[in-house]
Amino acid sequence: MEKNQETLRTLRHSTSHIMAQAVQKLFPSAKLAIGPATDDGFYYDFDLTDGHAFTNDDLEKIEAEMKAIVKQNLTFEKIYLDDVDAKIKEFKDEGEIYKAELLEEHKNDKPTLYLTKDKDGNILFNDLCAGPHVPNTSYIKANAFKLLKVAGAYWRGNEKNKMLQRIYATAYWSKEDLADYLHMMEEAEKRDHRKLGAKLDLFSVREEVGAGFVLWHPNLAVVREEIENYWRTEHRKRGYVIVNTPQIAKSKLWEISGHMDHYKENMFFIQKDDEKDDQYVVKPMNCPFHILIYQANRHSYRSLPLRMAELGTVYRKEKSGALGGLTRVQGFTQDDAHIFCTPEQLVDEINLIIDFVSDTMKIFEMSFEVELSTRPESYVGTIENWDLAEKGLKEAMDKRGMKYDINEGDGAFYGPKIDFKVKDAIGRTWQCATIQLDFNLPERFDIKYQDKDGQLKTPVMLHRVIFGSMERFHGILIEHYAGAFPTWLAPTQVAIVPISNDKHTDYAEKIYKKMRDAGIRASLDDRSESMNYKIRESLQDKKIPYVCVVGDKEIETNTVAVRARGIGQVGTFSVDEFISTIENEIKTRANKSFAKKD
RNA sequence: GCCGGCAUAGCUCAAAGGUAGAGCAACGGUUUUGUAAACCGUAGGUUGUAAGUUCGAUUCUUAUUGCCGGCUCCA
């Protein structure tokens, strides 16, 4: 068997069998659920029927036991089950109810068992498993796997089922590969936006305010301002109108929209003083308001598509355990838009949005994966409409040769959708942009347009976001740049450091003002610290893109000595030359410093 | 919501059934520096919150809030 990337999953799957064997030896009450390989490792789910919970010490013991097992040079052997019912009974007798359930389901699929045998042919472990596996344990290097963490996981991922204990682990062909992986994870943790958020004074979340409600500090507010400026200009260019709508509305609105029926558990309600008062609801979505704005006028096919956008702040009550950082919060601002169009315009409109998303991601040099989610079991509208819509979405993507996965049955109840997913620093994927078709709301609100033939028809409605939410996007942005924002986004773009406060502050202040006047976010560092300290703090700790050092030489020639973040000294420039270079870098939203040559 | 872990100074962490200590940051002073951490000093804490056990709790117990790793759900 060849040791390569493709067979790595096989190695990991085999290692998961070894882990299960070790666990059952050390914890006889452990019943087995499933233990597959994942993209960067594997896990196994156990039910510890004696109620014990795995600790970190347990993980070490299990790992030691696994090392002992692989050294015994055991073989993996595949056998077909002749008498499936007998095996089901055997599983049940052993208390292996999960394996029994799985086998019951696969009884007609020629189920196989994998045996782990020693030299003398004794069976030390067996597991219901389709395979494949490595031939023997010599492939599993004792120093190339590691148990990582314990986590809870529902049997079959269903929250109505019992919570099992999952052990996450990883395995590689060699010790070096494992070390590389662990090093990479360490590096990734350093770019975690929650850590950088505190270090760079970007945002905070306070217990007194509540979980999942973000306080944007001045530094991140600057980034957001730039992002919003981009967003607004770009929307104007692409033919959108921009609106504003209230934060709360009477429950009547949410009854019409269907949110009271389908979304109630995610909504925040405002306490009524009196029974006869109206119930008010904090908005979880912007769409009903946009529809009301649509309704304020009569529309004809000539005035469509109507593209209505809003940076709309919404509040959604989430299950407590789901929250974290900026990527999962309860109050967030969507860069929302709703497009009302005729069925004929649909594919073109979808294409325009995909253009918008990919143009935007290009600016940040972010890569993304695309998923198409189709009709779920419970849905509104007609099958014909759904088929048409799914076809439209596919057509739009195929036409441009876009790669995408299909998520059968994962669409919203009101329509199919295209999701764009971006990876964070530790490899978790987050949905940012999404395009959703909606058959529900136009009918519920009974909105119309007048077609060529004079008939009143129901328009098609698209929901879409480009960034998703400002909170989540900024979380990803922080990790993407590891806190070192490109100049156009950097909270402070230039730090000016006089060599001697006594002699050089006047000049420093002069060029500081000049940069401020030019719209550059400069800061003047005239604290009583050493020049070296200021340079280090600015470039390394605060991650400011440029430091301008000024002393006697610079005053004499009206110049600045420039040092760039991550690069070092880049030379002396006249003040005007430096300002216009920076201005250009900001204007073009360059990802790289002008000082970087490649 | 569920399983598990955590909560000590602004940050990173230490100690302990007899009311806590370091580094960095802050503040004060000295220094005025030629390219990625100058020196000296000062202050800083009801140990997340509430209750219980105890002569005494920050440490033990319970509840609660928040955070972290997952599951479920999701922008």
Image (cartoon, rainbow, N blue to C red):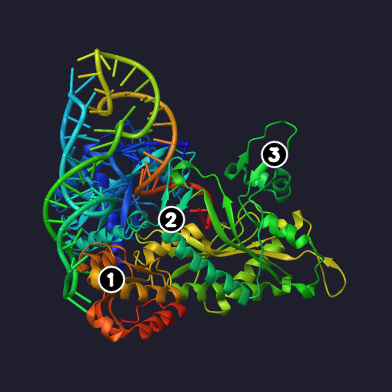
Quadrant in the picture for the C terminus of chain A: bottom left
Q: Quadrant of the N terminus of chain A?
A: bottom left
Q: Chain of mark 3?
A: A
Question: Which one is in front, A66 or A474?
Answer: A474
Q: Quadrant of residue A343?
A: bottom right
Residue under label 1:
A497
Percent across and percent down for residue B2 are: 43, 36
Q: Residue at x 78, y 64 (%)?
A: A458
Q: Identify which residue, A304 or A59, lies in the foreground.
A: A304
Q: Is residue A346 left or right of residue A66?
A: right
Q: Position of residue A299 (x, y in %)?
A: 80, 68
**Could you tell which of marks 1 and 2 lies nearer the N-terminus?**
2
Q: Residues within 10 Å of mark 2 (few under 14, many from 20)?
A: some
Q: Is residue A319 above or below residue A187?
A: above
Residue B42 to residue B34: above or below = above
Q: Amino acid at mark 3?
A: Gln
Q: Which residue is mark 3?
A: A279
Q: Earlier in the sequence, mark 1 or mark 3?
A: 3
